[in-house]
Amino acid sequence: MTTPLGSAWARSVWGRSARRRSALDALRDAVADGRAEVVAETLHRAVTLVVDGGGRVSAPLAPVRGRHAAAAALVDVLPRDAGTAATVASVNGAPALVVRRGAEVVAVVVTALRGRRIAMMWVVVNPDKLVHWNRSS
């Protein structure tokens, strides 16, 4: 069965994707700013942040809950040194934030929204899990 492009279902899926893209663009800009209070403005008040550092990268061991705590933890875990940039890219078919230091991917941030704000963030900074992102083609 095919779904017409103009169907309510298709508009709903594309609308969610557009909202997520917009939220990620705002998060990308806030992360580039580097201040937790700016990042917090992009987050839902009840956001949860889960970080996978794999024991190889300093990261919170338990989920971080709340806008301000999650913003501070995200700013702490993402690198901000020279040559680091975040872009929005497709991850598992959905928009996500990919952070690179030069050509190397050092973090991937997948999100879920509640309304128009980010309510859940899964961040992978574990180098072992980013290997496939950094293989030469």
Image (spheres, rainbow, N blue to C red):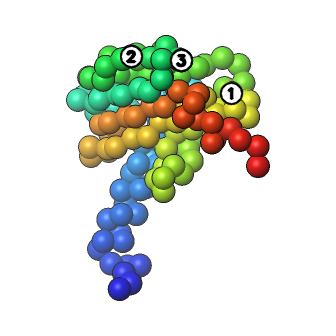
Residue furthest to the right in view is 137
Residue 126 in view (yes/no) = yes
**Residue at position x 32%, y 65% in the image:** 12
Residue 9: x %, y % from top left:
30, 71
Against 87, residue 52 (above or below) is: above
Label 2 environment density (alpha carbons within 10 Å; few <14, some 14–19, many ≥20): some
**Residue at position x 71%, y 41% in the image:** 135
Amino acid at pointer 3: Arg
Against 5, residue 130 (above or below) is: above
Q: CA distance from mark 1 to mark 2?
A: 21 Å
Quarter of the image for residue 79 reads top right
Disc number placed over residue 32 in the picture, else none: none
Quarter of the image for residue 112 reads top left
The residue under label 3 is 56
Residue 84: x %, y % from top left:
66, 26
Q: CA distance from mark 2 to mark 3?
A: 12 Å
Of circles 2 and 3, which is in front? 3
Tell me if 137 is positioned left or right of 32 in this view: right
| SS under mark 1 | strand
Which of disc 1 and disc 3 is earlier in sequence? Answer: 3
Amino acid at pointer 2: Pro
**Residue at position x 36%, y 28% in the image:** 50
| SS under mark 2 | loop
Disc number placed over residue 60 in the picture, else none: 2
Against 115, residue 84 (above or below) is: above
Of circles 1 and 2, which is in front? 2
The residue under label 1 is 101
In-front residue for pair 50/14: 50
Query: Mark 2 and 3 residues: CB-CB less than 8 Å, in contact?
Result: no
Which of disc 2 and disc 1 is earlier in sequence? Answer: 2
| SS under mark 3 | loop
Amino acid at pointer 1: Arg
